[in-house]
């Protein structure tokens, strides 16, 4: 493990129960990141999504992809960000979202995210989520530095 949960928290503002990255396995600065999250049986959303058949909501999976992209960007460009007027990045778009298989309680999800393009304040990431090597979701995420 490259970064544990406390180190992740130092890079993004998210906190429980809305922090969806447990650890970072690898980072290729400015390019790619691999992170993980184990969705435990007691996650706050399982009782309502869906009773008797709990699955991780797609919106949570895309949020985890976005958080992983934020970790990549903040880790890679930390010094630049400290010197700039920007304090954070906000999600501004999701494109090409596809959900291929449900994520169940107890699954460990691996998020692989690449920084595709950066133009001034706008960031574009490509991400995918897998469970046991099988793709469960993918999305392009755009964010704006603010």
Image (cartoon, grey):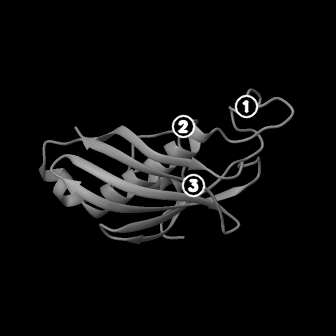
- The residue that appears at 71% across and 66% down in the rendered structure is 132
Reading the chain from its start, which is encountered first: label 1 or label 2? 2
* Picture residue at 50% right of the left edge, 42% below the top: 63
Counting from the top left corner in percent of width and height, residue 129 is at 58, 57
Residue positioned 74% across, 41% down in the render: 55
44 horizontally vs 93: left or right: right
Q: Secondary structure at mark 1?
A: loop
**Could you say whether the residue bearing mark 3 is in a helix, strand or loop?**
loop
Disc 1 marks which residue? 49
Q: In the figure, is residue 58 to the left or right of 141? A: right
Q: CA distance from mark 1 to mark 2?
A: 16 Å
Task: Count residues near mark 1 (Cα–Cα under 10 Å), then give few for <14, some for 14-19, many for 20+.
Answer: few
Q: Residue at x 26, y 59 (%)?
A: 117
Q: How many marks?
A: 3
Instruction: Tell me: residue 140, above or below residue 23.
Output: above
| Marks 3 and 2, how far apart at CA | 11 Å
Where is residue 23? Give x, y as percent. Answer: 54, 60
In front: label 1 or label 2: 1
Q: Above or below — where is 54 with respect to 27?
A: above
Is 143 on the left or on the right of 126, as rendered? left
Report x, y in % for residue 3.
48, 64
First in residue order: circle 3 vs circle 1: 3
Quarter occupied by the N terminus: bottom right
The reply to whether residue 5 is in sight is yes
Label 3, on which residue? 22
Near mark 3 (Cα within 10 A), the count class, few <14, some 14-19 or many ≥20, is many
Q: Residues within 10 Å of mark 2 (few under 14, many from 20)?
A: few
């Amino acid at each position: 493990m490259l970064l544990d949960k406390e180190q992740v928290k130092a890079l993004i503002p998210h906190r429980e129960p809305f922090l969806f990255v447990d650890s970072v396995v690898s980072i290729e600065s400015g390019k790619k990141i691999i992170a993980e999250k184990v969705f435990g049986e007691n996650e706050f959303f399982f009782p309502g999504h869906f009773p008797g058949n709990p699955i991780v909501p797609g919106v949570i999976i895309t949020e985890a992809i976005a958080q992983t992209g934020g970790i990549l960007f903040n880790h890679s460009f930390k010094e630049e960000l400290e010197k700039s007027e920007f304090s954070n990045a906000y999600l501004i778009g999701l494109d090409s979202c596809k959900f291929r298989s449900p994520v169940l309680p107890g699954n460990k999800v691996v998020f692989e995210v690449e920084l595709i393009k950066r133009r001034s304040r706008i960031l574009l990431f490509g991400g995918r989520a897998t469970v046991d090597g099988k793709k469960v979701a993918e999305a392009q995420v755009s964010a704006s530095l603010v």
